[in-house]
Image (spheres, rainbow, N blue to C red):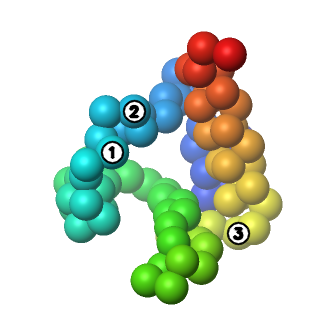
Amino acid sequence: MRRGCHMSKSSVVSELNNHDKMTVEQALEKVGREGMKDVLIISYDKDGALAITSSHMDNSSAVFMLEVSKRKILEGLDL
């Protein structure tokens, strides 16, 4: 386990498929209500530029979280 990033075997990527109509505000509110320990936010700003923000997380923990998330997303796709 990396510092600042807890990803267990049961970790699940959720809220991707059925929430394409969720606003930014709704998504952030949902995460706040659920009391997440660490977050990595990947977004586009108003000009379309990529923006990445995280809670007290070093770069290696952010990359680890991205890679685990990427694997979980790809495993869920019917390729």
Chain-order first, disc 3 or disc 1? 1
Q: CA distance from mark 2 to mark 3?
A: 28 Å
* Residue 61 spot, x, y in % from top left: 71, 57
Residue in the picture at 60% in, 14% down: 78
Which disc is residue 58 wearing? 3
Give the residue furthest to the front: 47
- The picture quadrant where one finds residue 54 is bottom right
- The picture quadrant where one finds residue 62 is bottom right
Q: CA distance from mark 2 to mark 1?
A: 7 Å
Residue bearing mark 2: 17
Q: Quadrant of the C terminus?
A: top right
Whether residue 68 sits left or right of residue 54 in the image: it is: right
Q: Mark 3 is on which residue type?
A: Asp
- The picture quadrant where one finds residue 70 is top right
* Residue 8 spot, x, y in % from top left: 59, 30
Chain-order first, disc 2 or disc 3? 2
Q: Marks 1 and 2: in contact by CB < 8 Å? A: yes
* Residue 18 spot, x, y in % from top left: 31, 33
